[in-house]
Image (spheres, grey):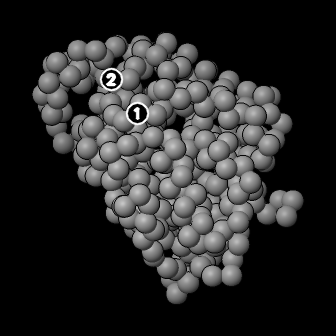
């Protein structure tokens, strides 16, 4: 059963937006220029870490991790090919940062702005992965003057509510995405889910900032029979048939809907269309569709490629 759970967790991390943590950065020879600081926000401390740190720097990259992740998923940016001062942080209620009861977009965005102010950054390149990509778009919408360019790593191209029509309802994401080891209580996690479900990310598509979107391949939802990785359809079927094997009750899974292969095909088509639509809606948004997994920033096979996309985009037009 542990093997099945491991396979399922791997699939979830690939396709549903969770954040994988990493310990070391490839090509990292800059620890001597790395600083760690706690920044106070409304009585709690926010953990931050800055690579290539210089007190004289006025422009920097800031990395925003996904729901349930922490600053370590931004380690791919700590690479000798990245010449920019780069700030990573544990966002509110995550990792080493303190907790607020009021989980709101204003608190989330204002705390990020405070971190930039703490480091005296006047212009920022906002890089967000998964829920962090939604956060990046919301941030530039509220703070356009400090936002110089935006990089969206496989999110912000749809609303969670859009997925209901593929039988991917909120209960599915609550069951598959919540990870107690993230440091979030389930109540906190639910409040963050509220932020997503009650938000219309399309209202940010009128951005005036140059934006790069890097999309993962939705084919990973179909699993891989050659390696024994099940499809999302199979994952849901396993959970519904024997929830206790996964630490769940029948009451918890009763609202899960069956997901057919047609649902997956329709979902894949929808996601690819939404990627294409971004650049049609706003010419300032460049879209790159890749064969990568959603975990592109921590996958050893792709994280350096993602870094290259980010740095090339920032350098262009400077």
Q: CA distance from mark 1 to mark 2?
A: 11 Å
In percent of width and height, residue 38 lies at 42, 71
Residue at 78% x, 28% y: name it: 281
Whether residue 270 sits left or right of residue 207 in the image: it is: left
- The spot of residue 130 in percent (x, y) is 52, 43
Task: Give the x, y percent position of residue 161.
Answer: 49, 21
The one nearer the camera, 207 or 40, is 40
- From the image, state whether disc 1 or disc 2 is nearer to you: 1
Tell me where residue 239 sits by quadrant. Answer: top left
Q: Which residue is mark 2?
A: 171
- Quadrant for the N terminus, please: top left
Q: Which mark is residue 193?
A: 1
| Tag shown at residue 286 | none
Quadrant location, the C terminus: bottom right
Q: Nearer the viewer, residue 145 or 128?
A: 145
Q: Residue at x 36, y 54 (%)?
A: 94
Give the residue displayed 23% in from the left and 15% down from the top. Answer: 254
- Disc 2 is placed on an element classified as helix
Q: Residues within 10 Å of mark 2 (few under 14, many from 20)?
A: some
Q: In the figure, residue 190 lies in which quadrant?
A: top left
Percent x, y of residue 3: 22, 42
Vertical relation: 275 (above or below) 308: above
Question: Of marks 1 and 2, which one's residue comes earlier in the chain?
Answer: 2
Identify the residue at the far front of this view. 42
Contact, mark 1 vs mark 2 (Cβ under 8 Å): no
């Amino acid at each position: 059963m542990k093997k099945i759970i491991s396979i399922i967790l791997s699939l979830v991390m690939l396709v549903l937006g969770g954040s994988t943590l990493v310990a070391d950065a490839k090509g990292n020879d800059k620890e001597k220029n790395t600083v760690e600081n706690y920044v106070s926000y409304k009585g709690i401390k926010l953990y931050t870490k800055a690579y290539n740190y210089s007190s004289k720097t006025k422009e920097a990259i800031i990395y925003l991790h996904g729901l349930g992740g922490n600053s370590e998923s931004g380690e791919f940016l700590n690479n000798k090919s990245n010449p920019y001062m780069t700030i990573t942080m544990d966002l509110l209620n995550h990792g080493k940062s303190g907790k607020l009861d009021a989980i709101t977009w204003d608190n989330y965005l204002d705390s990020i702005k405070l971190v930039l102010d703490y480091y005296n950054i006047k212009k920022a390149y906002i890089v967000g992965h998964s829920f962090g990509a939604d956060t990046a778009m919301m941030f530039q919408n509220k703070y356009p003057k400090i936002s110089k360019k935006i990089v969206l790593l496989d999110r912000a191209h749809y609303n969670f509510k859009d997925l209901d029509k593929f039988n991917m309802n909120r209960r599915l994401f609550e069951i598959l995405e919540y990870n107690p080891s993230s440091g979030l209580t389930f109540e906190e996690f639910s409040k963050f889910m509220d932020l997503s479900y009650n938000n219309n990310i399309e209202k940010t598509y009128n951005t005036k900032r140059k934006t790069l979107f890097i999309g993962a391949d939705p084919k990973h939802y179909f699993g891989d029979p050659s390696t024994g990785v099940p499809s999302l359809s199979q994952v849901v079927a396993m959970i519904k048939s024997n929830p206790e094997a996964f630490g769940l009750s029948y009451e918890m899974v009763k609202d899960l809907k069956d997901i057919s292969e047609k649902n997956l095909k329709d979902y894949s088509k929808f996601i690819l269309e939404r990627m294409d639509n971004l650049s049609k809606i706003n010419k300032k948004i460049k879209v790159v569709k890749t064969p990568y997994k959603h975990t592109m920033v921590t996958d050893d096979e792709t994280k350096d490629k993602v870094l290259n996309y980010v740095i090339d985009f920032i350098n262009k037009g400077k």
